[in-house]
Image (tube, rainbow, N blue to C red):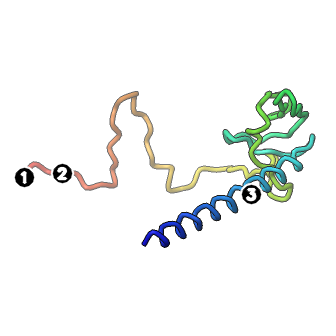
């Protein structure tokens, strides 16, 4: 019984070491891709272009909109976005008209008021 427990503990240690090595390798690959001009996704969900990075001071400048540059910790420049997947605002689809099924929706409720759905049957007090 104790042999099984020691064997199980050994297997868990091996899995933890393999997982840790894989994580370190992934982090090193991502760090090598972080070059000025790379499109990045920050750890807090903001897309931008890496302008400059100072690894010693742990600062990275990311342009999130034309002329808007934020300074972040490079560890939060989470992922480098592949150029084939990245989409700019100009490429995004534009909705020209409101769908027909949304035309009958009334949104004239004041703050805190309930809007009754006319598609639901009304309850009667029978």
- Determine which of the numbered discs, if any, sits on residue 33 in the image: none
Report how far apart the C-alphas of labels 3 and 1 lie in the structure.
70 Å
- Establish if 3 lies above or below 120: below
In which image quadrant can residue 121 be found? bottom left
**Residue at image point 65% right, 64% down:** 14
- The residue carrying pointer 3 sits among few (fewer than 14), some (14 to 19) or many (20 or more) residues within 10 Å by Cα, namely few
Point out the frontmost of discs 3 and 1. 3
Q: Could you say where residue 72 lies in the image, as x and y percent from the top left? A: 77, 31
Decide which of tag 3 and tag 2 comes sooner along the chain.
3
Give the number of the disc on residue 21. 3
Which dot, 3 or 2, sits closer to the camera?
3
Question: Mark 2 packing: few (<14 Cα in 10 Å), some, or many (20+)?
Answer: few
Q: What residue did someone put label 1 on?
A: 126
Tell which of 22 and 103 is nearer to you.
22
Q: Which residue is drawn at 79% across and 28% down?
A: 70
Report x, y in % for residue 37. Answer: 92, 42
Label 3 to label 2: alpha-carbon separation: 63 Å
Q: Which mark is residue 123?
A: 2
The residue that appears at 48% across and 72% down in the rendered structure is 4
Label 2 element class:
loop
């Amino acid at each position: 019984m104790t042999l099984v427990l020691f064997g199980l503990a050994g297997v868990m240690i091996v899995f933890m070491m393999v997982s840790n090595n894989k994580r370190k390798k992934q982090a090193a690959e991502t760090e090598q891709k972080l070059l000025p001009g790379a499109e990045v996704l920050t750890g807090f969900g903001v897309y931008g272009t890496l302008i400059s990075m100072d690894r010693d001071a742990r600062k990275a400048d990311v342009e999130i909109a034309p002329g808007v540059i934020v300074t972040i910790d490079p560890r939060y420049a989470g992922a480098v976005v592949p150029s084939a997947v990245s989409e700019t605002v100009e490429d995004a689809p534009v909705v020209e008209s409101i769908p027909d099924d949304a035309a009958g929706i009334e949104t004239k409720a004041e703050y805190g008021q309930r809007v009754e759905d006319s598609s639901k049957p009304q309850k009667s007090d029978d």
